Image (spheres, coloured by chain):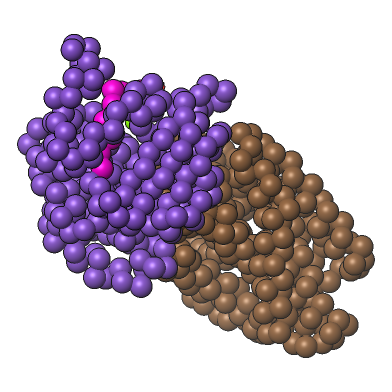
Amino acid sequence: MALLDTLLLALKTTFVSGLVLASLYVLMASGLALVWNTLGIFNFTHGAIMAAAAYVAWQISDPKGYGLGLAAGIVGALIASGVMGLVINRLLIAPFLNQKNVVLIAVMTTLSGAFFIENSALLIWGPRIKQLEKVVDGNLRVAGTVISGHEVVIIVIAPLLMLGLWAFLKFTWTGRAIRAVAQNREFAELSGIDVRRMYAVAFATAAMLAGFAGIMLGAIRFITPGLGAEPLLKALIVVILGGLGSIPGTILGAYVVGFSEALSTYYIGAYWTQAVLFLIFIAILLIRPSGLLGKD
Amino acid sequence: MGDVTLDVSGLVSGYGRMPVLHGVDMTITASDKPGLIGPNGHGKTTFFRTISGLNRAWEGTVRFMGEDITNRPAAQIMRLGLVHAPQGNTLFREMSVEENLLLGGFAPRARAVHKTTLEQVFELFPRLAERRRQSARTLSGGERQMVAISCGLMALPKLLVLDEPTLGLSPKLKMELRDAIAKIVESGVQTMIVEQDPEFLSTLTTRLFFMSEGRIEADIGDGQSLEHSRIREMYFGVA
Ligand SMILES: Nc1ncnc2c1ncn2[C@@H]1O[C@H](COP(=O)(O)OP(=O)(O)O)[C@@H](O)[C@H]1O
Ligand SMILES: [Mg+2]
């Protein structure tokens, strides 16, 4: 009996921590997938936007900043993320869209953009480590394990946001137009769709998703200019694993990576977990080269 | 005669450095039922891609309803009512028939009445109503052409260009599509139909342009017949 109890507890613990990780990865990766899917480029400022959003939220909410409270901080940071997305798209991507090697150019321009944003954050907010308040205080006991209220919010909000994103892309004129541009740019133009405008909307939406991920992270980890660096790498893995650009694939990828990471951390140890993740990553791509839900 | 719908003069365009169109002149008035024929590879598609803004005009001007639209963005030209159903039914493949049609009516003027237009389109092509939830990727060639034409209709065109709507279809399907196109023409939507087969156009058009090597070589108006010896000579190589 005791053995069974221990086993059950272990399963519950890994399930809960896997769920938290997976939900975070959903938030981090969905915007990256949206941009890849629509514009056909990888946006390496994605992680820097997470960090910048966390700083802005801190600046607005923290008593050492403007002290306006967390709600104002979140709203302000989301707006700032959207604006940042528009500016990044306008300066670093739109001018090169008609170049043949736009994919490579965008890697370089967005990598430089990421350095610029991270160093600006360092210049503005200094090296002192900051942290955001948690959205909800206190802990919850779920099925025998402890989980913070903040993590519960992340677990609940991640799928809700994805539902919202799906409804936006599926049922609104703008959302449909974004998918149209992704599937057939020329036919979209012939249908009267302003392609560049749709790119801007998709990019801003993705930046807001990144910003939200950054705000959630800023209460669990410490806010540094590099806050988004490791999440960006994870998001890349999740997006590729899910099947480049496919949003359902990205969500599935996030849960696969999240649970694998939790299981591996528990049973094999944190030290080996990155290696295990890459093994799983390579194994899946060997079996399905275009990712879990990717099209061949 | 009536008002001039489309007025193209001296249009030159091509790919890379190679010109394909060598100065195309074409004037269409509101009362024309225009058609364009010409052998494969002589620039028909290039001509329409250029007037609808997908390819750049190197020289010459395109005027539509009196407005100079030369080298305007495709989305703008389309919003003026010059609607182009491209060759090879390139649809939004991963979307349903209905979503494709809705996107055809994306522009504000068309969006305002998209529900009514959708009903009219389904009346014209009942098969699309049955398949409205099906993804465009899974349709047959004929059904895809129906979607491509219908997307054009959803845009409330003032001039609808159909680039080889029956390419690769069986004779039976071809007839079916011809009847549908005839209904569109009858309903008062000016339609420019591009075909390689002059026979197909005989009942649909009153004015036939013949394109050869990037020029309009003949412009046959009402009353003149296709037996026109110049066409026979150029098209079939016999006089
Ligand atoms: N995308 C392209 N790139 C280069 N050449 C092209 C392209 N499309 C068409 N062409 C060339 O332009 C010429 C005219 O083609 P097209 O306009 O498609 O003729 P049509 O529609 O009358 O069959 C052909 O010689 C063809 O090879
Ligand atoms: Mg052609």
Is B36 inside the magenta-drawn segment? yes
Residue A47, position as x, y percentages in the image: 71, 56
Chain letter, colour brown in render:
A
> Horizontal placement of B230 versus A252: left or right?
left
> Horizontal placement of B71 versus B120: left or right?
right
Is A154 inside the magenta-drawn segment? no
Vertical arrangement, residue A93 with respect to residue A215, above or below: above
Chain letter, colour purple in render:
B
Residue B121, position as x, y percentages in the image: 20, 60
Q: Which residue is drawn at 82% across and 57% down?
A: A118
Q: Residue at x 63, y 67 (%)?
A: A208
How many labels, in total? 0
Of all residues shown, which one is farthest toward the left?
B172
Q: Nearer the viewer, residue A24 or A13?
A: A24
Residue B175, position as x, y percentages in the image: 9, 39
From where the camera sits, is residue A272 visible?
Answer: no
- Specify the segment rendered in magenta: B34-41
> Horizontal placement of A7 versus B128: left or right?
right
